[in-house]
Amino acid sequence: MSSHALHVRRWRIAIALTAGVAVVYFGFILLIAYRKEFMGSLVTNGLSVGILFGALVIVASWVLTWLYVLWANTHFDSELAALSGKSGSVSGGPR
Amino acid sequence: MMLQAAVATPAVAQAAAQVATQAPATAPTTAIGEPNAVAMTFFFAFIAITLGITYWAARKTRTTEQFFAAGRTVTAGQNGWALAGDYMSAASFLGIAGLVATSGFDGLIYSTGWLVGWPVVLFLIAEPLRNLGKYTFADVVAARLKQTPVRLAAAIGTLSTVTLYLIAQMVGAGTLIKLMFGLTYETAVVIVGAAMIMYVLFGGMIATTWVQIVKAGLLLSGAALLAILVLARFGMNPLALFAAAADQYGATVLAPGKLVSNPLDTISLGMALMFGTAGLPHILMRFYTVPDARAARKSVFYATGLIGSFYLMTFILGFGAMVLVGPQAIRAVDAGGNMAAPLLAEFLGGTPFLGFIAAVAFATILAVVAGLTLSGAAALSHDLWTSVIRGGHAREGEELKVARYASLGLGIVAILLGIVFKGQNVAFMVGLAFAIAASANFPALVLSIFWRRCTTAGAVASMLTGTIGTLLLIYLSPVIQMDILKEPSAWFTLRNPGIVTIPGSFLVGAIVSMMTRDEKALAAWDGAVHDMIVGKDETASS
């Protein structure tokens, strides 16, 4: 794979994951703005939907970050190693 | 109200002003505001340790690369902690805890908003930035484009962001420290400024990095200790704590409330928070301190974990302060609610714990202003002096000398601005800094990294639109027109311009790029993509 192809693949994954975070966060914000009563309803004693979703926004950020790092550490880095091996440069490759 | 400087947004300040009028006059018994021996001891210990670090770092700071990028020897783990220390300001700790304690759920909008920018930094910016640049984000935007116009426009964006952020931090520092240690406002500002100048001037990025690591450790352990002590009173069950809050103050504290009066404003603020993080010069600069893109990637992963854990703990601290201390007692000490966490510490662990938390708050501000000053100095010396004035060929050692003068100058300016803005409502300035970072710096970075057709004119137009557009709309907004100038109405109705300026900068950058041709930029695309993915050889850097 060329550095161009790798750049394009990284870009697609980056955009998809960024869209994921945006959907999660702005979904949360829109619910706060337009569904106040739903966000205030209780899941169980002491836990409103809003608080649960707020915590889940943080957890979702972690999960998406972890997914990207998982992909980059395995797929991206191995493609990069193959590419660097071909071009004779090792800078930026896995250590 | 001054203390709202610690909190990022004007909407918050306004709501706090509304609730403040209902606060009772009865002040609770508290040691806050009196000279506190424990606080002083912790504080001087922190200053002594960090100056020791600075002395050690100064001996290792001989080149420009060491001064701005710690010789690129910081590990991914260290950088993760340092990023957390660079990012989490007093607003996060005192501001959010206070907001939750006095308004309940609404404060959590900020807990989440300040985290969601980090995945964006990771996905779009961190690795290309590390591979293409040297010290500043302008390195990346200018990689394929004409140096002078891009560097000038980027420096305007950087210095606007840094100055606004610095004013908010310095005014917040003066007020907080006055409240917690009983020092005068001016003394507090001068102490913060002087310590920050020492770190940056002598120890550069190495000292700044370690000050930020120590601060992140103190802040996270302080917050964790507070959270555990709170939960211990509720059977280690957060839901029992939230239920107690609902029992005492009504179920509305668990639901969205009056801070979210204008949905469009909330979305606009959310956009600025989410994309602003990826455009903050002092955060971006930290990615140059690690050896390669892989380490940059891992460091964001650690930072996101640390910062997210911290914001989850703010849920506990805020509701803990609400139940155990009470909103009225908190507002009686400070109308903005910023003393919620210190009061909670005093309730749980007496004066010694209060002293510890007060010293942590001080350390928090110091680490942030040091990072800000260093990134401002990089824009002045690397972007303006070396690249624009010297055409990219500064004499050996010259860039470092200019960087030191710039750090000293910025430090003095920060102290002066802190004193000038005493008593002013600067609450909107952090929100404004995020809005400029999101509209001026972030779109230009994304366009130049991912779009082959991006031209010099396009990038410059995007950065200028972002900076000038944001400043103009803020000036026309209720924040300046109604809150400060006391006009009856404002031409632009939103308190945060992000929803207009972020898409606006992208659009202007794209349209101007499509209308202009930049042969040099097109020709350099293949090389830039290769450098972005594979990385440049670092041995050539000065």
Image: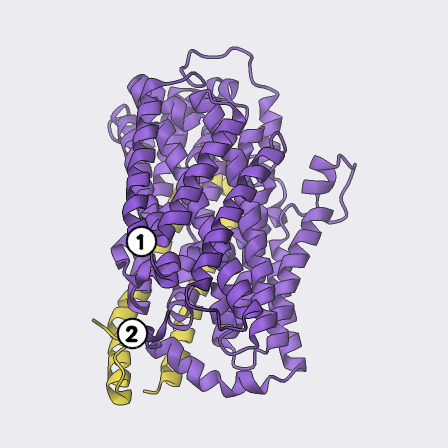
| Residues marked 2 and 1, same chain | no
Three-letter amino acid code of the residue under disc 1: Gly
Q: Chain of mark 1?
A: B
Q: Is residue B81 something that shows in the picture?
A: no
Q: Nearer the viewer, residue A50 or B200?
A: B200
Chain A, hue in figure: yellow
Q: What kind of colouring is applied to the model shown?
A: by chain
**Horizontal placement of B370 versus B41: left or right?**
right
Three-letter amino acid code of the residue under disc 2: Gly
Q: Which chain is purple?
A: B
How many numbered dots are placed on residues in this image?
Answer: 2
Q: Which residue is mark 2?
A: A92
Q: Which residue is mark 1?
A: B80
Q: Chain of mark 2?
A: A
Q: For residue B258, which quarter of the picture?
A: top right
Residue A16 is situated, as x and y percent measured from the top left of the image, at: 42, 69
- Residue at x 36%, y 60% (from the top left corner): B69
- Residue at x 56%, y 36% (from the top left corner): B418
Q: Is residue B247 above or below residue B387?
A: above
- Residue at x 36%, y 46% (from the top left corner): B85
Q: Is residue B222 something that shows in the picture?
A: yes
